[in-house]
Amino acid sequence: MNLTVNGVAFDVDVEPSETLLHLLRRVGLKGVKNGCDNGDCGACAVLIDGRAVTSCDYPAPAAADTNILTVEGLGTEGELHPIQAAFLDAGGVQCGFCTPGMMISAYELLGRVQEPSDDEIREALRGNLCRCTGYVKPVEAVRIAAARLREAAGG
Amino acid sequence: MADRFVVVGQSERRVDGRALVTGKPVFAGDLDLPGMLHLAMLGSPHAHARITSISTERAEALEGVELVLTHLNTPAVRYTTAGQGHPEPSPYDARMFDPKVRFVGDRVAVAAATSKEIAQRALELIEVEYEPLTPVLSIDDALAEGAPIIHDEADASGIWDAEHNIAGVVEANVGDVDAAIESAFASVEFTGETQYAQHVPLEPHVSVAYLDDNGRLVLYTSTQVPFHVRRIIAHVLDIPARQIRVIKPRIGGGFGVKQEILIEDLVGLVTYRTGLPCKFEYTRAEEFSQSRTRHPMRVSVRLGADEDGHLIAVDMNALENTGAYGAHNLTVVSNAGSKTLPMYNKAPNVRFMAKGIYTNLPVGGAYRGYGATQGIFPLEVGIDMLAEKLGIDALELRRRNHIRSGETSPIFEELGEGRKGVPQTIGSCGLERCIDIGAERIGWSHKRSTRFREGPWVHGVGMSIHMQGSGIPAIDMAAATIKMNDDGSFNLLVGATDLGTGSDTVLAQMAAEVLGVTIDDIIVLSSDTDVTPFDVGAYASSTTYVSGSAVVRAATDVKSQITSVAAAMLRTGGDELELGDGRVIAKDGRSVTLADIALRSLYGVDQFQIGSTASFVGDVSPPPFLASFAEVAIDTETGELKIVDYVAAVDCGTAINPRLAEGQAEGALANGIGYALMEEMRFDKYGRMRNPDLGRYKIPAATDMPPMEVILVDTYEETGPMGAKSIAEIGINAPIPTLANAIYDAIGVRLTHPPFTSEKIWRAMQG
């Protein structure tokens, strides 16, 4: 089947029972994490055609002919996406295992809402469990990222 | 205090942050090797049974299966999975695979195959016959007359009294508690019983093993204790330690559960036997049932005071459920007293009695807070009760009794970790200011005892105070190596284990501070037993204090070597030189760059490698302190509880990196709030966990967290590196007693069994 991940076209064979998480990790996108196998923790979150899903319980075949965004598509080490930079500046990263999924949820939110309230940010991150931070600094990171993105858009 | 430093006290970005936010494959589970085998584990369906026969022939015959491990073909050596230093204080009551199983999920067999799916299919082909035994599912059942003996094996060692299911016993006694309570003007008694709970790191345990070019075994593993893994795996598998290399890459949280040696023996043995690389990662369900838990405890506290509110007696009695094996039982239950009782050091009569009890339930282990969480709950509720009885404000009663700078407690010496402790006098103590600042911020004086109402909601405020330690004194050792490179940068090699805490960053900041460079000039490599010097690992709130002290020593030595080279270059005395901005500067303003100094030392005259290795063992374990305050609102019709506001003021000495320090406290508080309000492993009558997934075992999500503020209260710990103490654990202890006291302030009911769910609150209100 064909799918596009982070702007790169893939032509891959998939088993009917394969999950999207398994497929993405198999092709080398290890930033997508498995924390629960069950769709409960959000560490495996990706965007499919702009919609956030948990890839661990999403059948790979159902992703045929879609556009997928993973953490690897946000920015590079040389040029971080404002969300990535904000997570570092705010101290929103501790162990970093939930961070890719959390940033994907943040990206989805900031695509919809330019100036989210803290409640909106918490709602957007609700599906991304984190055991390290208590969410104070990830929420702050999203707030900072939103402000920087607004500033950049405003010129 | 931070203004005396340049790099220390700054909220630098994490040194590993860029790799983490870009999703680089930096975790153990991200490593895939050609020809790698995958393991799957068969866990016991019984809580207590003997394996009478086991046949693996059909499984071994399955295409793709390389090896099946059971008790019949694995080492029978007894050990403990606890992952502690040598000699270990936990009993040697476990073996790789045991012909007797002691909890649901206990290891029965492991299959290694070319894919996880094949390994799982192989498990279904293993034929096992069990002789079920009566399961022991509570402390009371374990202690009952004629209870089944859980550890009846002859070759175990270090068990206190196996016949009566008692894994460990610890006692400490100062003065005459019974007589003092008898004669006290006021006395109270309270028993709190904490529940089974899990650490839930987002990354379950994962290990990869492979043989290097010389046939040595490499374990690439999510551990908090790489050096203990090497020592213990060498013992269990009977492989010389020199043949083993343990590497800890980034790990996805630990909180104590990755101190345990849970899967390294399996991947190690499979790779050693087959020569093939292999990987094992727990599923979330396995992480719940097979890894480790917080030890549930029933802790009773009796307190006596004179009419002025001076404590004259503190009596604590703890019964700990250690589950099927005794990992950490003695040391965790010791800390229920040793990390709480010294806080009330004015009482001349103090007694602590504790027992660790075996049951056929999941195994307790190290968990952030490490017994203090369980012990402080009844103690801080008891203090609240005493305040009420004496008619003294709860803050004031604590102020009259808590420990202060320059004071000591007999408990420091009487009670260590399963043995005598170490005497110590408190250096830094910001507890008075923590109480004042937190009380002001929460509005204590106008909110306490007012029972403010809004419709069915009634408000209350509660608080509690806390201490922990900074490493295990006279035991925990850490070392650091610093060497200078020819561009004036430095390699910092530490055995210390960053499990997401940011310790690599904090240690780099300390080195940069001493060497007068930026954090970008320090290249950190941690936790590789072939490359880095020894460190006990990340536990007991040790890294900033113990490992940090080793880093400061090594950096100070390197600095003096740099200065001596610079003195020759500048033709001046070494004592007239200062380091800063990547240069060595003489009093007259002349300077040389570190790069020039490095080039000269490596290529010029009198060549040598500028570098040093230094070690540190603490003589003392300076406690951080914390005052915790919460305002709650309770719906009197439904029992629903909302935390309106949560404030914690923390004294961790110098915060080397304030953002990371706040993050430690915030994360610990969130974990503690989960434990106080929602988290509980539940079991059926067969000892099977009823909620082994994150849909049913709820941990706090972003929307569950209340407004929460952490305030760092500045002190300077003279024995610590740049004035620092620990901060990672203390916060987790606070929510249970704080919320229990706030609930009482709101509705006048003392809850004894967390989690404090709406249902429990509602039932308690019905009387």
Image (cartoon, coloured by chain):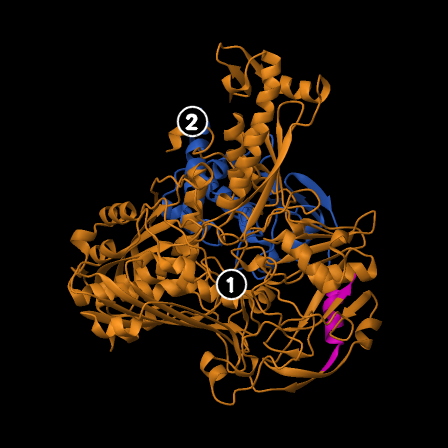
Chain colours: A blue, B orange
The residue wearing badge 1 is B694
**As rendered, which of B458 and B49 lies closer to the eye?**
B49
Three-letter amino acid code at the position of disc 2? Gly
Pick the residue in front: B15 or A138.
B15
* Discs 2/1, front: 1
Residue A57 position in % (x across, y down)? 60, 59
Chain bearing tag 1 is B
Q: Are marks 2 and 1 on the same chain?
A: no
Q: Is residue A137 above or below residue B306?
A: above
Residue A25 left/right relative to A153: right
How far from the left and from the top, in percent, is residue B533?
A: 64, 43
Image quarter of the C terminus of chain A: top left
- How far apart are the alpha carbons under marks 2 and 1? 41 Å
The residue singled out by tag 2 in the image is A154
Q: In this image, B612 relative to B732: left or right?
A: right
Residue farthest to the front, as pictured: B175
Residue drawn at the location 62% of the way across and 26% of the way down: B489
Mark carried by residue B634: none
The residues colored magenta run: B112-128
Amino acid carrying label 1: it is: Leu
Q: Position of residue B412 (x, y in %)?
A: 40, 57
Left or right: where B330 falls relative to B206: left
Q: Answer above or below: position of B594 versus B675.
A: above
Residue A64 in view, yes or no: no
User: At x 64% / y 17%, what residue is drawn?
Assistant: B596
Q: Is residue A40 left or right of residue B215?
A: left
Q: Does residue B124 belong to the magenta stretch?
A: yes
**Residue B270 placement (x, y as % from top left):** 77, 62
Q: Nearer the viewer, residue B341 or B363?
A: B341
Q: Is residue B597 at all visible to an observer of this figure?
A: yes
